[in-house]
Amino acid sequence: MTDIQITASFDAGNIEVLSIDGAEARLAIRKDHASDFFQWFHFRVSGAAGRELTLRITGLGASAYPGGWPNYDACVSEDREFWGRAASEWDASRDGGTLTIRYQPEGDLAWFAYFAPYSMERHHDLVAHIAGADGVTHRSLGLSLDGQPIDCLETGTGPVQVWLYARQHPGESMAEWWMEGALDLLADLSDSVARELRRRCSFHIVPNANPDGSRRGHLRTNAAGVNLNREWDSPTAEKSPEVLAIRDAMDATGVDFAMDIHGDEAISAVFLAGFEGIPSLRDEQQAGYTRYADLLERRTPDFQTKLGYPLTRPGKGNLTMSTNQLAERFGAVSMTLEMPFKDHDASADKRQGWSPERSAQLGRDCLGALLEWLVERET
């Protein structure tokens, strides 16, 4: 019987083939360039029709977040449109920590990924589509180290300066699916929520803050191996031009409300992280964050406030992280939104787990909650 073929030589691809025997393979994940981070995988299997695939990704005990592997099922697609889940088993004691994926495709081809990929080609399609909508303008804030544009889409004429940005960590592809949902709503002239938001706010939206890491198949860093969400206190053109370009643009407009969109490997829920540890924290600033979380929880059962990260002690906030930096720098109500790589335990979906579709819907729900928050502030 012929061996299956495995490749990751494409946009956002990442896998190393250690061995193949028939329909079984032993694999490893390539580290981010100039970094020890690794967790993101994305590869194609061919020659698979009617065969029970057994794919073992090894060495995962040394991955960035080993806690992300228990109770995790890999994402799989046979048409690159619908992404479901393939039964997967974690064994911490085997071959340095091994995730075994088992799947029998109907056709010859199957793609596997840590989460449904959001390719740079799809990113350019999104930018072109939204930039062509009435009332939307586009500007490039600068270039990445690999020379890719930092795209920013802008809409609205109101006084409240809102910044939404995603994929500082490129392997967290659910963040750009969230962006797709949010942008589709804001560009819809017939949508009443979007109309009221555009009247009250000026939106500045960066769908992908790390295009180099996205194209290279990185988990967490840019082309220089730098974690962009640890660069906000003193970004440089040499190491983090992406953050420098975005922060300079924010300095020009000011920031009243900001959301940094991410994914979390271990926690099977959607949650927010705030800025409670910043040195200049004001009571009304913290109250604005808390009220937004309450409104979002009321609006969608996909969001909750019980699970999340430990609170930071007063005065100990890390100002190299964007949410803390923006709250301290501008007095903004800023926040980090986290979505799961795994399933969403409170409302599990065995077929898809947390999915691109739910990420996009959450983007729309977050904007709906923002409108409620703004109306409350006005009254």
Image (spheres, rainbow, N blue to C red):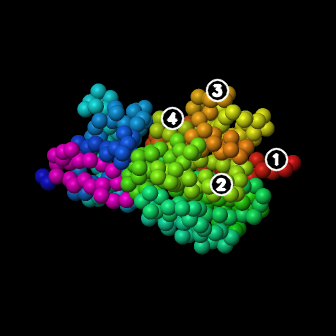
Apparent side of residue 12 relative to residue 45 in the rendered image (left or right)? right
Amino acid type of disc 3?
Arg
Q: CA distance from mark 1 to mark 4?
A: 32 Å
Q: CA distance from mark 3 to mark 4?
A: 22 Å
Q: Residue at x 38, y 42 (%)?
A: 35
> Disc number at residue 102?
none
Q: Residue at x 68, y 41 (%)?
A: 328
Q: Foreground mark, 1 or 4?
A: 1
Apparent side of residue 134 relative to residue 143 in the rendered image (left or right)? right
Q: Quick one: SS at disc 2?
A: helix
Find disc 3 in the rendering and name its residue. Answer: 313
Amino acid type of disc 1?
Arg
- Give whichever of discs 2 and 4 has the lower sequence position: 2
Apparent side of residue 91 relative to residue 116 in the rendered image (left or right)? left
Dot 1 crowding, Cα within 10 Å, few <14, some 14–19, many 20+: few
Amino acid type of disc 2?
Met
> Disc number at residue 377?
1
Q: Residue at x 34, y 44 (%)?
A: 31
> Disc number at residue 267?
4
Q: Which residues are magenta?
A: 3-25
> Disc number at residue 250?
2
Amino acid type of disc 4?
Ile
Q: Foreground mark, 2 or 4?
A: 2
